[in-house]
Image: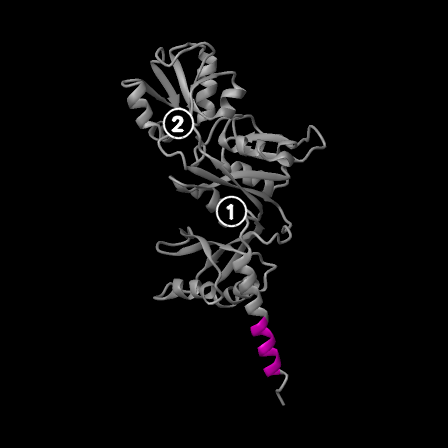
């Protein structure tokens, strides 16, 4: 599926540009959920799309200047966070998130043209995708042989290359389109609300606030002691800033030494967000800023507007008091 982090074969990236279009790397081969998400964004799909074998390869290529942008999965509703993406962003590269994309993990049975469901004896797919279609397979193809692949796109490519009506694959609609396959059964996943979130990264630049933004940071503790995480979280609770993700990751320096990835509603341009980051930077061992960027989904800036107004009122009150210093 590549939604939760499996790598897939693709061509190697060369440093030479083949056009003047913006160069965008993604987890390949053609037909992955990452590429499908890319094709839903008009500006991104117009770029020169370059497939890579792993998410780390995409991120390093952006970091080293071989790509303008990279698109990688960061979280799946069922499988959780994609640690390969998070760790590379936290420890190995200096990149900023430019936006997020959300793609529904919709799965289909794909077969060579003219093949039927009843004739399928073997199905190729990534094990995660096969497991998420367990109910449909049990009801429609009991006893079918499951063959593991590195991704749903690779599975579709394998089924197309075989040209055997008894060999099908579980893949997304984009893969069926790319490899010329039919879809005799669609929406066969057990969890139709499953979604994967992707991030678009570049070497620099912070998008202007939109009123519906997120910010991502990594906080390194000054000391591992009781209440250290609570002290971090209180900076946001005190300012009514909502956290949308909290994840601990080993720092890879010593056993038991952890840092925290936090995603929060708001933009570094918002004074309440900036104030919380300033305090964390001053009180913790370090803070790595991963970006402020437009959030996917429905706009909901009302709560942050209220908090911002309250902050300005409190700031004016404090300034009035300090003006009285003698």
Counting from the top left corner in percent of width and height, residue 28 is at 52, 29
Establish if 82 lies above or below 182: below
- In the image, which disc is placed on residue 183? none
Quick one: 193 or 101, which is closer to the camera?
193
Judging from the image, what secondary structure is the residue with disc 1 in?
Answer: helix
Question: Can the viewer see residue 198?
Answer: yes
Which residue lies under the disc numbered 1?
89
**Magenta stretch, residue numbers:** 313-322
Q: Residue at x 36, y 10 (%)?
A: 119
Establish if 230 lies above or below 217: below
Judging from the image, what secondary structure is the residue with disc 2 in?
Answer: loop
Taking the image as shown, residue 68 lies to the left or right of residue 219, namely right
* Label pair 2/1, CB-CB below 8 angstroms: no
Q: Is 197 colored magenta in this rendering?
A: no
Which residue lies under the disc numbered 2?
126
Q: Quadrant of the N terminus?
A: top left
Q: Earlier in the sequence, mark 2 or mark 1?
A: 1
Establish if 173 lies above or below 38: above
Crowd around label 2: few <14 · some 14–19 · many ≥20 (10 Å)? many
Question: Can the viewer see residue 222?
Answer: no
Quick one: 311 or 87, which is closer to the camera?
311
């Amino acid at each position: 599926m590549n939604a939760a982090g499996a790598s897939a074969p693709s061509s190697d990236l060369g440093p030479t540009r083949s056009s003047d279009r913006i160069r965008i790397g993604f987890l390949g081969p053609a037909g992955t959920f990452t590429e499908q998400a890319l094709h839903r964004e008009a500006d991104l799909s117009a770029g020169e799309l370059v497939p890579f074998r792993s998410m780390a390869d995409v991120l390093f290529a952006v970091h080293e200047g071989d790509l303008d942008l990279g698109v990688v999965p960061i979280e799946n509703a069922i499988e959780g966070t994609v640690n390969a993406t998070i760790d590379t962003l936290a420890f190995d590269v200096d990149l900023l998130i430019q936006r997020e994309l959300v793609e529904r993990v919709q799965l289909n049975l794909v077969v060579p043209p003219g093949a039927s469901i009843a004739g399928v004896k073997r199905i190729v797919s990534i094990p995660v995708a096969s497991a998420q279609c367990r109910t449909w397979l049990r009801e429609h193809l009991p006893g079918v042989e499951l063959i593991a692949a590195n991704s749903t796109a690779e599975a579709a490519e394998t089924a197309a290359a075989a040209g055997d009506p008894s060999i099908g694959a579980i893949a997304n609609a984009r893969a069926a389109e790319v490899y010329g396959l039919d879809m005799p059964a669609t929406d066969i996943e057990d969890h139709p609300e499953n979604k994967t979130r992707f991030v678009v990264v570049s070497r620099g630049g912070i998008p202007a606030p939109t009123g519906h933004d997120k910010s991502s940071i990594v906080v390194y503790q000054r000391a591992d002691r009781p209440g250290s995480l609570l002290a971090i979280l209180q900076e946001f609770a005190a300012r009514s800033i909502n956290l949308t993700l909290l994840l601990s990751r080993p720092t890879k320096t010593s056993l038991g030494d952890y840092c925290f990835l936090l995603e929060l509603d708001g933009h570094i341009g918002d004074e309440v967000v900036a104030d919380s980051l300033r305090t964390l930077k001053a009180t913790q061992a370090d803070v790595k800023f991963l970006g402020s960027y437009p959030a996917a989904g429905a706009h909901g800036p009302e709560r942050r507007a209220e908090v911002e107004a309250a902050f300005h009122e409190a700031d004016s009150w404090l300034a009035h008091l300090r003006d009285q210093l003698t």
